[in-house]
């Protein structure tokens, strides 16, 4: 599958450069926002099975302010972030601030810092939840599985599992889910610090803990994913991110091959260049 040359040419972030975008789902990405309200899930609120497409997330501006649910005049291309408070950065530690500053400055200077997805590795958590590609949820007894079109990333979420105190560090981390009323609560630990939060490069460490709360909103047309982040290495206190996923029974996930014609592999200096 060939990459979308228009998206590649923008060269704004390593995240955008790493994406191998098909022309087919480039069109579907626009449809995911424009037609989301037309599909209503009328079944059991505990039944999340189906295909979803991210439809709401904050956008980062060139002056480091954020605009939620829409793009401001200063919005950077491919700058989808998980921040929720307008005009306010997450509570970075000195380590987190230095990492973010390096990524942000690389983005605005067209020298983006490569991240794992640049070389076709998994997007990781929590960034995968705002990737602009379809995601399918499959529910089986005792487990929820999230299958993402982008690079065939998969999240396995056993239900009512006790998470390990010393988890194995992986890109997606180790998760456990349970229901609180009609809200699905997912706790995730062990998400590798090699990954990043979002398209612009908001950092985290191996010590990140994510608590997600997913529930139906807007008359059962969308899933809201409220995420609480705790990471004592990157942040001085917990903070909350938000994404909204439209239920899309009219589309299906398809093949995605990042390794084919990957023109944006990382350079020896850890940066990447559109080719």
Image (cartoon, grey):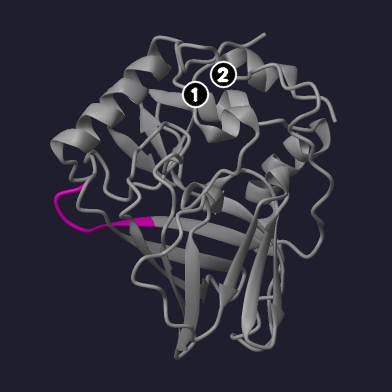
The relative height of residue 150 versus residue 230 in the rendered view (above or below) is: above
Q: Quadrant of the C terminus?
A: top right
- Closer-to-camera residue (10/207): 207
Which mark is drawn over residue 266? 2
The relative height of residue 242 versus residue 269 in the rendered view (above or below) is: below
Relative horizontal placement of residue 213, taking residue 246 as reference (left or right)? left
Q: Secondary structure at mark 2?
A: loop
Q: Say which residue appears at 53% left-offset and 55% top-offset.
A: 172
Horizontal and vertical percent for residue 102?
31, 21
Q: Quadrant of the N terminus?
A: top right
Q: Magenta span covers which residues?
A: 235-241
Is 107 in the magenta?
Answer: no
Q: Say which residue appears at 38% left-offset and 16% top-offset.
A: 106
- Closer-to-camera residue (134/190): 190
Report crowding for label 2: few under 14, some 14 to 19, many 20 or more residues within 10 A (C-alpha): many
Horizontal and vertical percent for residue 245?
58, 59
Q: What residue did someone put label 1 on?
A: 114
The relative height of residue 192 versus residue 266 in the rendered view (above or below) is: below
Horizontal and vertical percent for residue 119?
62, 28
The relative height of residue 145 versus residue 113 in the rendered view (above or below) is: below
Horizontal and vertical percent for residue 227?
38, 62
């Amino acid at each position: 599958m060939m990459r979308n040359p228009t998206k590649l040419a923008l060269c704004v972030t390593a995240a955008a450069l790493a994406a191998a975008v098909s022309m087919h789902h480039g069109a579907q990405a626009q449809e995911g926002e424009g037609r989301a309200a037309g599909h209503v899930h009328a079944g059991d609120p505990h039944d999340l099975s189906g295909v979803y497409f991210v439809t709401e997330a904050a956008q980062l501006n060139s002056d480091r302010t954020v605009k939620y649910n829409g793009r401001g005049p200063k919005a950077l291309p491919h700058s989808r972030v998980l921040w929720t408070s307008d005009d306010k950065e997450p509570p970075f530690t000195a380590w987190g601030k230095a990492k973010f500053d390096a990524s942000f400055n690389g983005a605005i200077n067209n020298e983006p810092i490569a991240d794992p997805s640049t070389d076709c590795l998994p997007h990781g958590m929590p960034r995968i939840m705002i990737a602009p590609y379809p995601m399918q949820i499959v529910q089986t007894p005792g487990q929820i599985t999230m299958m993402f079109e982008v690079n065939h990333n998969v999240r396995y979420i056993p239900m009512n599992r006790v998470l390990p105190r010393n988890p194995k560090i992986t890109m997606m981390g180790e998760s456990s889910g349970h229901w609180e009323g009609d809200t699905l609560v997912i706790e995730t630990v062990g998400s590798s610090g090699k990954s990043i939060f979002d398209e612009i490069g908001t950092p985290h460490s191996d010590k990140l803990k994510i608590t997600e709360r997913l529930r139906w909103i807007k008359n059962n047309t969308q899933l809201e994913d409220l995420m609480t982040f705790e990471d004592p290495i990157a942040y001085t206190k917990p903070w909350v991110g938000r994404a909204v996923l439209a239920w899309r029974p009219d589309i299906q996930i398809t093949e995605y091959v990042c390794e084919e014609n990957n023109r944006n592999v990382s350079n020896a200096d850890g940066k990447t260049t559109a080719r």
